[in-house]
């Protein structure tokens, strides 16, 4: 399957809820589906970049902040603002750029459906926490973690002697590192060893090596 083909089978139930919520929200706000299509085209073009997800969210912010300067009408800027907000609200917990691409591809299709279907009632979106939990569950089911296993992690935050590690782009763990915290910088890539696992097989504790 190529990245331009969207299949429903690869989306989880929570991701489908997100897809419908985004589509309904954008239709209620009268957002132009063609403007969404342009953001999807940007993501598709940059999908092979290692930081494709963060680049995409920065691109949305740039559209909002620079919209008037590059000649767009006020209405187009409103479209960009709506797209940026709905993506920030619903997709911040989705780390995988390919998944975001699939979701927004379906959003484009569903927007046309909801636009023709008539008035949309109150939207009950999935919580950000449920989105994140679904992503973590996906990682757990596709990886067999083991005590003693060595993994690559990214240092995402340092507060005092506490260091937050992000593993596989989804799992975040905060550990006390009184002897090593001052040696790290945010964004640094490090190797960590799994010291303990939870009952569901997910990672409970790691230590840098």
Image (spheres, rainbow, N blue to C red):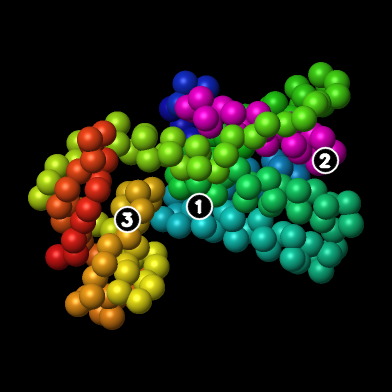
Q: Residue 73: where, in percent of width, then height?
A: 89, 57
Q: Which residue is mark 1?
A: 53
Measured Cα–Cα span from mark 2 to mark 1: 25 Å
Disc 3 secondary structure class: strand
Tell whether 144 sits left or right of 77: left
Q: Which mark is residue 191?
A: none
Tell whether 181 sits left or right of 119: left
Residue drawn at the location 72% of the way across and 31% of the way down: 123
Measure the C-alpha gap from mark 2 to mark 3. Answer: 37 Å
- Residue, far right: 74
Tag on residue 173? Answer: 3
The quadrant of the image that shows the N terminus is top left
Residue 29 got which mark? Answer: 2
In front: label 2 or label 3: 3
Residue 120 place in picture, x, y as percent = 81, 26
At 62% from the left edge and 32% from the top edge, which residue is drawn? 19
Residue 15 lies in the magenta stretch: yes
Q: Is residue 94 magenta?
A: no
Give the number of the mark in front: 3 or 1.
3
Neighbor class of circle 1 (other Cα within 10 Å; few <14, some 14-19, many 20+) is many
Residue 37, given in percent of the width and then of the height, sits at 69, 41
Badge 3: residue crowd in 10 Å (few <14, some 14–19, many ≥20): some
Query: Which segment is the magenta one?
Result: 11-33
């Amino acid at each position: 399957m190529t990245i331009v083909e969207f299949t429903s089978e690869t989306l989880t139930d929570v991701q489908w809820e997100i897809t419908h919520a985004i589509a309904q929200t954008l239709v209620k706000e009268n957002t132009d589906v063609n403007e969404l299509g342009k953001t999807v085209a940007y993501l598709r073009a940059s999908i092979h970049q290692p930081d494709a997800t963060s680049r995409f969210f920065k691109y949305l912010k740039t559209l909002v902040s620079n919209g008037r300067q590059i000649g767009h009408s006020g209405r187009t800027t409103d479209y960009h603002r709506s797209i940026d907000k709905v993506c920030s609200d619903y997709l911040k917990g989705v780390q995988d750029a390919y998944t975001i691409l699939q979701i927004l591809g379906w959003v484009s299709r569903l927007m046309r459906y909801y636009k023709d279907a008539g008035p949309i009632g109150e939207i009950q979106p999935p919580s950000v926490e449920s989105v994140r939990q679904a992503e973590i569950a996906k990682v757990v089911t596709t990886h067999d973690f083991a005590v003693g296993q060595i993994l690559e992690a990214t240092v995402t935050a340092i507060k005092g002697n506490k260091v937050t590690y992000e593993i596989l782009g989804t799992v975040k763990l905060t550990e006390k590192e009184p002897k090593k915290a001052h040696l790290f910088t945010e964004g640094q890539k490090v190797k960590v060893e799994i010291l303990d696992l939870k009952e569901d097989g997910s990672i409970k504790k790691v230590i840098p090596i």
